[in-house]
Amino acid sequence: MNVINNPARQVLKNPGAFAIRTLKSFRSNQGFLLAGAVAYYSLLSLVPLLIIVVIALSHVIDQAELLQTLGRYLEWALPGQSKPILIELANFLAHRDVVGWMLLVTMLFFSSLAFSVLENAMSVIFIHRVAIRRRHFLVSAILPYCYNVFLGIGLLLMTLVSGRLQTMGSENIEFMNHHWSLTGISGVLLYLLGLCGEILVITSIYMVMPVGKISLRHALIGGVTAALLWEITRHILVWYFATLSKVSVVYGSLTTAIVVLLSLEIAALFLLFGAQVISEYEQIGSRKPAGS
């Protein structure tokens, strides 16, 4: 089989060249600038999106349990900064009766901004797709709200499964007069649940946001790449903010906003880099060998 027609074989044969080509393409696409834009609008969309999702799901699940699950998985996206956001979210929910139609419409609008900007950023990275086919503007307008519903359903499922795993952690196994606690197993399963959920969300973004259909295998390649990069960085950020960081001395009351924005920008950087990996992988077969 021709190597040119087998992208996986070509990447495995020379992974360094593929990585360098991907980094160069990401730089030429202004990846850092795109990540900054996505992070800024994500900061604007985060709280309105969380408020809408929690208000909707609180009719189905206990609010305290929902906030506990939300706080646990917010730590994956915003290391060390979930508590201030949850406090503000709880304060808002305690006064939800003040939410009128105008405020609800405003929150819906702002909750969609991050997805709209992310779609535009993806169109820059997947320019080879946009040059062939463009998405109808009505699809682009509706897509962010559909994705908000998808995230709400995902949070609902995560809350239900997390609650069951936490209950399991309080149980013991007894066999031949020996007792084993399931706390450790429950903690591992909760971590794996979060990691799988992270990969699933990122993979779904790669399948939905770019123009045209991306295969599940290609989306998983980008999803696993972005998730693993973020997992490594997330633990470094947790350690850094807990031990070395003096950001609170410099920024004072703005510390939470600055740290959240920094975390979102790094996460957006990896998200877009994963998309660049998919884009480069897709184009391997279309490139001609040197000298042809």
Image (spheres, rainbow, N blue to C red):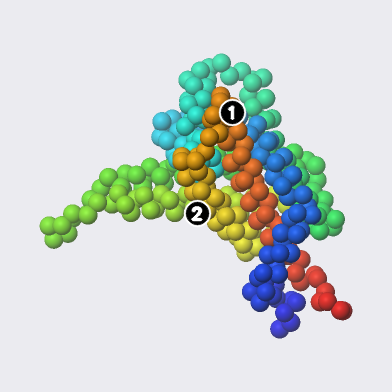
Residue 196: assigned label: 2
Check if mark 1's residue and mark 2's residue have beta carbons within 8 Å. Answer: no
Tag 2's secondary structure? helix
The front one of 248 and 39 is 248
Tag 1's secondary structure? helix
Give the residue at x 68% y 36%.
40
Residue 140: assigned label: none
Q: Residue furthest top?
A: 98
- Mark nearer the viewer, 1 or 2: 1
| Of the image marks 1 and 2, the number of the one nearer the N terminus | 2
Give the residue at x 56% y 16%.
98
* Distance between the alpha carbons at the discs numbered 1 and 2: 35 Å
Asked where in the image residue 150 lies, by quadrant, the reply is top right
Image position of 58 with respect to 151: above or below: above
Task: Pinpoint residue 74: horizontal percent, then vertical percent.
Answer: 51, 39
Give the residue at x 66% y 77%.
13
Q: Amino acid at mark 2?
A: Cys
Q: Residue furthest left?
A: 177
The front one of 137 and 260 is 260
Can you see residue 51? no
Pointer 1 residue: 251
Left/right placement of residue 61 relative to residue 224 reads left
Task: Pinpoint residue 65: horizontal percent, then vertical percent.
Answer: 41, 34
Give the residue at x 24% y 51%.
181
Task: Pinpoint residue 174: horizontal percent, then vertical percent.
Answer: 18, 55
Image position of 183 with respect to 95: above or below: below
Q: Amino acid at mark 1?
A: Tyr
